Every structure is written in structure tokens, then in C-alpha cells.
Image (tube, coloured by chain):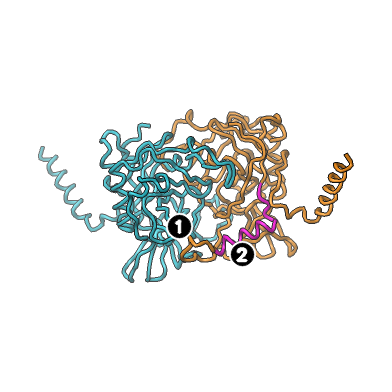
Chain colours: A orange, B cyan
């Protein structure tokens, strides 16, 4: 018994000592209050929200999710290689019931702001990097923004900057970086991306043969993970992009030492082509 | 009757006059001898081969397809955001029966070689562009190569440059451009990409929880379209990337004039983010 207590004590002691290094853990648990469980007819998807970057959008979206706002809503605009977009019928009472949001496309940064830098070579920004698992870009010391990558969750809008309300999209193809800063990104898929990519396209081929709306993929349900009964939750951990382990992986990815690379590629890293791994702690039972 | 003949004659005349402008048609029919129909359990996929860029790979692969080599083969390595790879069991008699190919990762070009240029700004090459619907990159006047984009079909290989035989992969995520030149690309998906993206991942999450091989997605059949009974063919036309219409679309894509772009993005075009549209002429009956 004493031995047990001693072990427990020393464990606590070690944990306490390690507190300053807490961010150097390789894996990070997601906050269930900040995670969505999206159930599609063909599979389950887990999304991490980004309140630290887009607080107003996350607040409003989470509120809608809590009211089951999106259950039964369809992906009505799904363009292969681009986006899968969902939301209530345009101009419907439900659509009009949601307040308009001011865009949160970028945020001011100062010299003290930092991220895990991926590249200084980037065609859209002075540098790119990752923070809290999200891909970002920045302009010198003035501003930073979440960048569009496959799996990005962002709000759709009208022609005005401040016109988003409830319609949203997932990026399903090569990163449309030209939408950076002029759209509000507020989350990313951390599990089940293959189910997002399998959403029914709304035309067979771009610009042709519109698919009957009855065949559009519906959202069975979208819930905050904290509202999902415990035995139905999918609990995910994601790589801590601030860890030394992750930094080392970035170096290995930039300078390919494996003999498979009989000619070395240029030391270029596309921020959207850097995997931030997830791992399943509990679930998915199908 | 005379009127009919006259109309027909003038039509032929117009066609003949237009012969020099044959490449300025907006759409291009695919050659059925150079097109694959891949049937997966959940949908059909059409692939255009690239014998003009990778002749030996296309010749060998087409020969295998004609022998139904891939029917029943499984996608045994499917990594979300990266590739879906298939081929016979490593080291099996079937696997060893196929000759090894010399890599066709790039080809020499001279000053007369041209493509429809997309960008001179590119982190991996001196310029990028499109030719015959395929994305390419080039180094000044010396060489050019097909680039990895979503939907690219390429041969897998061992650590040696010249070690590919029958294993192949589709790119299913953000373009892994670091594989350019050191792999042989020999085709691209022109229809049904959503079915490629829905192929069962072989681990639930990268590096974790391998999925039982019995659940791996099989190839129901892979045929040359010319070998498919006529009433089961899927006939596709693709945008002619050498047309003036396509060149105009590139300009519009680089300089966004639509009011949706209340702030103009930088005039950057990622060659893998330029859609080359397809249209369905005949099929798909499901």
C-alpha cells in the first residue's frame, strides 16, 4: 500500500515538474466542447473548431449546432476538387433566422506572435506555419490567417465581406489558397476525411448534369462532442504542432534522407501537404 | 433535296477551312484506346493515359489491363491526404511476372517545346503549365515532367529509380510535388474522382489501427474503354488546354474580377488547382 502511494506521489511529482514542458507532449487531446461530431449517411467525421482564431464564428456555429440546426441539411453545392458546401435553403425562414457575421479572415500579430514555421518560400504570404494543428500564413509581423487546405472548414458568404451566417464548406481538393483572408476559416477535419471526400457531387462533372437534389448528401446530425452520449463519442488526439517531435518531423520532411529519394527533391514544404496526424483514443464503432 | 446537299457541302467546306484551327476546339474527345474504365464496388472511374509523355509505362500497363491483370486486385495502401495504391501481393508469382520498367520521370525539351503556361512562379520548377490536359512543370529549356496533382495516376516503385512494374497509385490529397521527376506519372482521372477519394483507407488514421485486408477496396475490373461493350462505355470529352477559350479562363482565374473578391488575391495560380473540365457524352448508367 505504501509502495503504491509512493509511486503515485512520484508520478504526480514528475507531472508537476513537467508542467513547464506541457506543450512538448507529442499528442494533444481535443476539448470535447470544441469538437464536432458530424454524422453522414456513410460515416462519421470529427472536426476541431478554432475559437482562438475565429471566436465569433465558432460561437455562432456552436450555438447553431447545439440547437440541431444542421440536422437534415443537405450538401447542395459539391464541386469535385473544390468544396462541399451545406446550409439551409437560400432565403428560407431558417436561413434568414441566423445573424450575419463580421468576417474573421485574418488577425493582427506582433513580433511576439509565433508559430511552427514551415516555409518562408510561399507564393501567397511571407511565411507559412502551423499552430495548434492549424495551417496558417503570415505577412511579416503584421497579420496572420488560417489558410485553406484539404479538410478546412470555413463559412460561405455572399459578395460582401460581412455576409456569412450559417452556410459552410469543407475543402475537398487541392488547396484554394486564393480564398485565404477573404473567407473565415473556423475549423478542420481531424478524422473521417474520406467521408467528406465521398459526399455526393451535385453535378456529375463540373458545370454539367445537375444531380437531383433528392440525391444530395444529407447531414444526419451534427453535435458538439460534449453533447454526444459518452459511449458514442469518438475521442481523438492530434499531433502537437508545437512539440519538438513535430519540429523534427518537419526537418525530415524538408530534407529527404531516405534512400527512396535517389535524387533529392527541392527543400520545399507546402503547408497543406504537411500531415498533422490524428489518433483514435475511443470509438469509432461504425 | 438540293438545299440539303448545299447545306452539307457548305458544312464540309467550313470544316475543311477550320482544319488549321482544329486545336482551337474547346473540347477534345478521348481516344478509347487510350482511356481506362476502372470499376470499383461503389462507382466507375475514367482515366486518360499519357503515352505521349510516358510511352513505355503506358504500353506495359495497357498490356496488363488487356489481360485483366488488375481485376480483383486490392488497394492495399491508402493513406488519407496522400495516395491510394494497388497491385498484386508483393513477391507473389503474379507480382514477379511483370517486367521492370526504366523510369520515365521527365523528358528532354528544346526551345520549340511549348505548353499552355500557368505560372512562372513555382517553388519546384522554373514554370508550370498544361498540355493535352495534363499538368506539367519545366526547367528552362532543358526538361519537362508531369507533376503530381490530385487525380494523378503514377507507378509505385522500390528504392531504385528503375524498379516499377505493376503497382500504381492515385493521388487523393494535396499535390505531393516532391515526388515529381522521381516517379513515373502516366495518366489522370477525368471522371469519377469522388470514387477514388472514397477508397477505404488502410488505416483508420495515418500510422494507426490497420484495417483488416478483407475490407480493402477491390478493383472489380479495369479495362481499356475500347474493350468495353459499346453500351457500357463512358464517353468523356475534356477541355482542350491548348484552346484560346482555355487560355482566357486562365487569365480570368489569375486576375479575379468578380465582385465576390472584394479584396483581390495575389495573381498566383497553382497548376494543380486549375480545373481541366470534363463532360460526359455517353453513360454513366450507374
Residue depicted at x 47% and y 59%: B179
A253 in the magenta segment: yes
- Label 1 marks a residue whose chain is B
In the image, residue A72 sits, relative to residue B13, either above or below, namely above
Q: Cα distance, mark 2 to mark 1?
A: 20 Å
Q: Looking at the figure, which quarter contains the C terminus of chain A?
A: top right
**Residue B28 image point, x, y percent:** 30, 49
- Counting other residues with Cα less than 10 Å from the Cα at mark 1, is it few (<14), some (14-19), or many (20 or more)? many
Q: Looking at the figure, which quarter contains the N terminus of chain A?
A: top right
Would you say residue A156 is visible in this rendering?
Answer: no
Residue position marked by numbered label 2 in the rendering: A126
Element at label 1: helix
Element at label 2: loop
Residue position marked by numbered label 1 in the rendering: B271
**Residue A93 image point, x, y percent:** 62, 30
**Residue A182 image point, x, y percent:** 60, 52
Amino acid at each position: 500500500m505504501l509502495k503504491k502511494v509512493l509511486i503515485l506521489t512520484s508520478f504526480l511529482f514528475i507531472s508537476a515538474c513537467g508542467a513547464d514542458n506541457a506543450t512538448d507532449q507529442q499528442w494533444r487531446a481535443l476539448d470535447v466542447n470544441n469538437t464536432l461530431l458530424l454524422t453522414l449517411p456513410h460515416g462519421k467525421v470529427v472536426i476541431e473548431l478554432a475559437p482562438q482564431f475565429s471566436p465569433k464564428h465558432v460561437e455562432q456555429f456552436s450555438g447553431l449546432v447545439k440547437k440541431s440546426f444542421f440536422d437534415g441539411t443537405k450538401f447542395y453545392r459539391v464541386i469535385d476538387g473544390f468544396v462541399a458546401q451545406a446550409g439551409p435553403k437560400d432565403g428560407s425562414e431558417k436561413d434568414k433566422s441566423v445573424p450575419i457575421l463580421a468576417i474573421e479572415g485574418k488577425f493582427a500579430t506582433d513580433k511576439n506572435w509565433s508559430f511552427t514555421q514551415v516555409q518562408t518560400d510561399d507564393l501567397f504570404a511571407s511565411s507559412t506555419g502551423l499552430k495548434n494543428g492549424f495551417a496558417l500564413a503570415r505577412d511579416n509581423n503584421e497579420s496572420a490567417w488560417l489558410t485553406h487546405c484539404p479538410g478546412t472548414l470555413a463559412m460561405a458568404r455572399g459578395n460582401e465581406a460581412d455576409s456569412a451566417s450559417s452556410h459552410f464548406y469543407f475543402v475537398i481538393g487541392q488547396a484554394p489558397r486564393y480564398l485565404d483572408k477573404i473567407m473565415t476559416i473556423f475549423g478542420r477535419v481531424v478524422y473521417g476525411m474520406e467521408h467528406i471526400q465521398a459526399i455526393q457531387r451535385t453535378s456529375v462533372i463540373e458545370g454539367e448534369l445537375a444531380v437531383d437534389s433528392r440525391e444530395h448528401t444529407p447531414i444526419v446530425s451534427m453535435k458538439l462532442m460534449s453533447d454526444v452520449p459518452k459511449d458514442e463519442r469518438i475521442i481523438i488526439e492530434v499531433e502537437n504542432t508545437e512539440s519538438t517531435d513535430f519540429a523534427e518531423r518537419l526537418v525530415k520532411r524538408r530534407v529527404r534522407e531516405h534512400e527512396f529519394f535517389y535524387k533529392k527533391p527541392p527543400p520545399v514544404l507546402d503547408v497543406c501537404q504537411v500531415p498533422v496526424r490524428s489518433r483514435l483514443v475511443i470509438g469509432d464503432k461504425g
